[in-house]
Amino acid sequence: MKSLKDFYDDTAEQWAELWYKNETMLPVLQEFLNCFLKKPIILDLCCGTGYESMRLKGLGAEVIGIDFSEKSIDIAKKKNKDICFFVEDIFNDYSYIGKVDGVVFLAGLVHISENQIYKVVENLDKVLKKDGFILISSKIGNGLMQTKRIVEGIEYERPFYGYTIQQVTNYLSNDYSLIKVIDGEPDWFNIILKKKG
């Protein structure tokens, strides 16, 4: 069985084809950027092929993107020459990117188990400035929903987790406060949290 990283490397072009033209998240991103009083530096964590990075840049933010899929980052760089992208795993220390005002974490949580959330937040804390904001978009559910995915006859390890807003805010409650819930796609939630000072 191939890995989760293989899945995103092998399907990078399909994700780009689908999402560069799909503006579903545009109003959510705009609402998130309304949190900032000046032009923010935003980290697009698990940025994939850079489609939401492109939208954030178009809305006036300075953007940095991180993803563990080399193929996805190759596409992101080709399509967004004025955005800085890094191939990096969110479980590794990526503080070399410098400090950011905000983080968008869209659909990245779906591949992270409960016992991995704290490591992700620990790394995120290293780059997010005091009083910074996070936008999280995730599938509504309660735990592991899927373990693998088959694409064109190839089987991939692809754990997929669902969470409730309450679960996520509980995990982050020591360091973050829930600011807003934004309506979105059915079965998904979008929340904005603020880092405590």
Image (tube, rainbow, N blue to C red):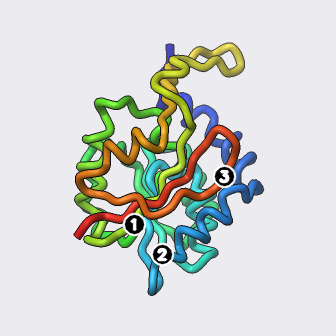
Q: Residue furthest right?
A: 21
Amino acid type, label 3: Gly
Q: Residue furthest front?
A: 166
Work out whether mark 1 precedes mark 3 in sequence or the reverse, and give the earlier one.
1
Residue located at (68% from left, 13% from top): 153
Residue 40 lies in quadrant: bottom left
Relative depth, front residue between 163 and 146: 163
Residue 48: percent from the left, percent from the top?
55, 48
Residue picked out by circle 3: 184
Residue 125 lies in quadrant: bottom left
Residue picked out by circle 1: 133
Instruction: Assess whether mark 3 and mark 2 are in contact (beta carbons under 8 angstroms).
Output: no
Instruction: Assess whether mark 2 and mark 1 are in contact (beta carbons under 8 angstroms).
Output: yes
Label 3 CA crowd tier, 10 Å (few <14, some 14–19, many 20+): some
* Dot 1: element: strand
Residue 117: percent from the left, percent from the top?
32, 39
* Dot 2: element: loop
Residue picked out by circle 2: 35
Count of marks, rendered view: 3
Between the C-alphas of marks 1 and 2, the distance is 8 Å
Q: Where 52 falls versus 155 (above or below)?
A: below
Q: Quadrant of the C terminus?
A: bottom left
Q: Where 124 falls versus 99 (above or below)?
A: above
